Amino acid sequence: MKQSVIRLEKVWKIYTMGQVEVPALRGIDIDIKQNDFVAIMGPSGSGKSTAMNMVGALDIPTKGRVFLDNIDIATLGESELAQIRGRKIGFIFQQFNLIPTLSALENVTLPMIFQGVPKAERIKRACDLLCKVGLGDRVHHKPNELSGGQQQRVAISRALANNPEVILADEPTGNLDSKTGLEFMESLRRLNRVEKKTIVMVTHDEKIARQADRTEYLKDGQIVKRR
């Protein structure tokens, strides 16, 4: 039986704006197990980005609990949580979030620095990852010297830098043309099926969500259906 990797139990997230409380999430339950491929889908304002922050242990719920490897993240200090998150989860963002002044190689080595990986090992692993995605001849190029698809491949390599169990992708095809978007989805499927990574993907695109094994549909901060 597959073990839970990330579990949300009755999670609420309420933002206070002046005198007004705005609930972004209203008591959602999500259980993500090892090697799952899950899409979180919903229209703009549905709460899917907030749900992503909870799944990624980037935020603490107002009410309810978030478990990462069966540890309630609310019981962890920020430094301890950052270390666990850095080892366990790799993030791929819609805007790629590459540091423009750093080369592809330096961008990929960055997460390993925070985990205390020795320099020689960082460089070797980053080179290996970039070569694997066909960027062996672009390791010293900065983001503005790379195409959108190449930047996305650097972002994938960076997400894999610490060999995490979970990959979280936030609107990963939003800035890509359809051909590059399909290539990216093939990369995610390969990570899930061949390398046995757990994939969680936020999207508003039904066609992209259908690539996942399971979809959680959000509306007004609640899960309204599952596929």
Image: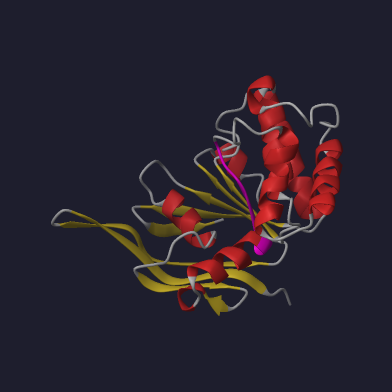
In this view, the residue farthest toward the front is: 119
Residue 147: x and y in percent read 68, 22
**In the image, is 33 to the left or to the right of 21?**
right
**In the image, is 21 to the left or to the right of 130?**
left
**In the image, is 10 to the left or to the right of 211?**
left
Which residue lies at the image location 59% right of the left edge and 30% below the top edge? 100
Which residue lies at the image location 75% right of the left edge and 37% below the top edge? 105
Q: Is residue 91 magenta?
A: yes
State which region is magenta: 87-94
Q: Quadrant of residue 182?
A: top right
Which residue lies at the image location 56% right of the left edge and 78% below the top edge? 71
Q: Visible in this render: residue 5?
A: yes
**Relative depth, front residue between 114 and 195:** 114
Q: Quadrant of residue 85?
A: bottom right
**Relative depth, front residue between 168 and 214:** 168
**In the image, is 46 to the left or to the right of 205?**
left
Which residue lies at the image location 86% right of the left edge and 47% below the top edge? 124
**Relative depth, front residue between 95 and 142:** 142
Q: Quadrant of residue 34?
A: bottom right
